[in-house]
Image (spheres, rainbow, N blue to C red):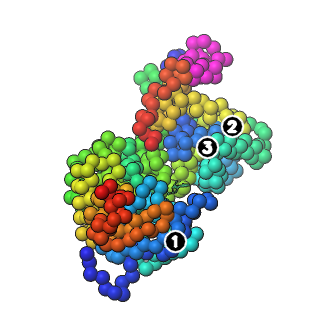
Amino acid sequence: MLTIAPSEPPELELSQVDVFYGKAQILIDLSIHVERGEVAAIIGANGAGKSTTLNLIIGKLKPSKGTVTFAGEPIAGRAIDKVVAGGIACVPQRRRIFSTLTVMENLEVGAYVRRHDKGGISATLDEVFELFPVLKRKAADMGGVLSGGEQQALAIGRGLMAGPRLLLLDEPSMGLSPKLTTEMFASIRKIAEGGRTVVIVEQNAYAALGVADYGYVLEGGSIALEGHADELLRDDHVRDAYLGA
Amino acid sequence: MLGQVIASGLAMGCIYALVALGYAYVWNTMAIVNFAAGEFLTFAAYIFVATFTMSLGLPFWSSLLLTAAAMAALGALFSRLVFARLQRQRALVAIIATVGFGIFLKEMARIIYGPEPLLYVSPFGDDMLDFGGFRLSVQQLLIMVVVVVVMAAQYFVLRYSMIGKIMRATALDRETAALMGIPVNAVLAGTFAFSAVLAALAGILLAPLFYVTTEMGSLVGLKGFVAMIIGGFGSVPGAIVGGVLLGVIENVGAFAISSTYKDAIAFTMLLVFLVVRPEGLIPERSADRA
Ligand SMILES: Nc1ncnc2c1ncn2[C@@H]1O[C@H](COP(=O)(O)OP(=O)(O)OP(=O)(O)O)[C@@H](O)[C@H]1O
Ligand SMILES: [Mg+2]
């Protein structure tokens, strides 16, 4: 982890946010605090509000109460393209690869917000190919023919191509074998070590807390528990409810 | 004689291909059918002939560019104002809005330009050119050249440019495209504008072959739709092949049977295809629509 000067604002802060879908309240008084360079995990069951939290950060949803700040700046209510151009990328649940675009085209489309920054794009492309060599080998293949693990790699690579400081990952372990999950989370750890801040949302608490510095347990739209990742891994409630121990 | 029948069928088929391509683009990105396409064609023919050529006395290519620009603006505005709102409700509502807008355009043409048919004489003359026994009029050649250039250009743009890539991404999965920071509404408006330009080109190229009337686009619009179904709903190469095939077969059929049956032949073709090969000649792979 980076050492943080005390004056530096948190990279991401959600402060007492409420989010509604119509009349249904999905997030209740939610607060999250992520320091620069940190990996944060938000674990929770089906329907706990994990994707909703990421949709709020990326600008798909607006909070009816509370604030969202990125590097000290309020971003709640900004349009998605502004948020992405400002340095946040979201890797969606179920990967959502553009199936009839090639691997390379998927990556290029991911870089849309900085399409004029050729140098930045080619540097990130090298980084992505180093992280996931399979994407380089299959650059000319259609996205839709890749295996589940390859598609997840592509989804993450596509997110990185926007050049984000903050990367949001929505259930990257979904549908992956335990072995592939371990590999995927090792790659995610590397992304953070490259200087990016990462927020992972997961049902697989073991995998996510295994690479995270700090964790939150989301239940029914609010934070039930938070703490350092290794503390949460030892916590009785977490073990009972999320680790099947 | 048959050569000439095929030549004029090819030219007409190229026109259908333009219109069909417009349907395919709009279908792929918005999942609706723009039933105003025929009236975009009509309206474009009017502003090209009556406003830019006759009133302002502009040369052919300037009139063409201005007409294309005006129709692009109209298409973008229409999709932006009307669709952006309606589509969130239901595709059917948006489709009916296109029908309504078509009627509006037709009536506007009548109000602005009057009920009399306009005669437009091509500045390129009506000479016949001989290609080793295969005879084409200058206008037919112009139609084919313009259509081939447009088809090639759209292919390269769609395949290799950033605009083409974000259009394909938006067509596949609008929500994820938006998540990448792609301005999805602008892409949709741009697609609609492009389909309006295709219809405009069809109107401009048809003007010297027919009188310009408020009805001139209706049947062509429908046949363009038939062409897209024959080629494969939403399929870009299908639209081109379907259009050309429809133009040639209806013309040859009319020549062999009777020209009275020309339109009947076109719609019989539609029925035959719907029964025998409903997915069309070059179906869009199901994987193309996520
Ligand atoms: N578009 C929507 N309209 C209405 N309710 C929604 C919508 N999207 C999600 N919800 C509801 O919000 C709640 C939280 O959904 P969310 O997708 O954030 O859960 P999640 O934690 O990501 O679950 P999962 O692990 O299944 O992805 C659920 O009860 C869900 O039914
Ligand atoms: Mg979710």
Cβ atoms at labels 2 and 3 below 8 Å apart: no
Residue appearing at x 54%, y 25% in the figure: B246
The prevailing secondary structure element of the residues shown in magenta is helix
Q: Which mark is residue A29?
A: 1
Residue appearing at x 46%, y 59% in the figure: A48
Q: Give the spatial CA distance, label 1 vs label 2.
A: 65 Å
Label 2: state its secondary structure: loop
Q: Which residues are magenta?
A: B250-272
Q: Nearer the viewer, residue B249 or B279?
A: B279
Taking the magenta stretch, the answer to whether it contains residue B270 is yes
Q: Amino acid at mark 2?
A: Val
Taking the magenta stretch, the answer to whether it contains residue A79 is no
**Which residue reaches farthest bottom?**
A7
Q: Which mark is residue B91?
A: 3
Mark 3 packing: few (<14 Cα in 10 Å), some, or many (20+)?
some
Counting from the top left corner in percent of width and height, residue B25 is at 51, 42
Q: Nearer the viewer, residue B222 or A169?
A: A169
Query: Which residue carries the number 2 mark?
Result: B212
Cβ atoms at labels 1 and 2 below 8 Å apart: no
Q: Give the spatial CA distance, label 2 vs label 3.
A: 32 Å
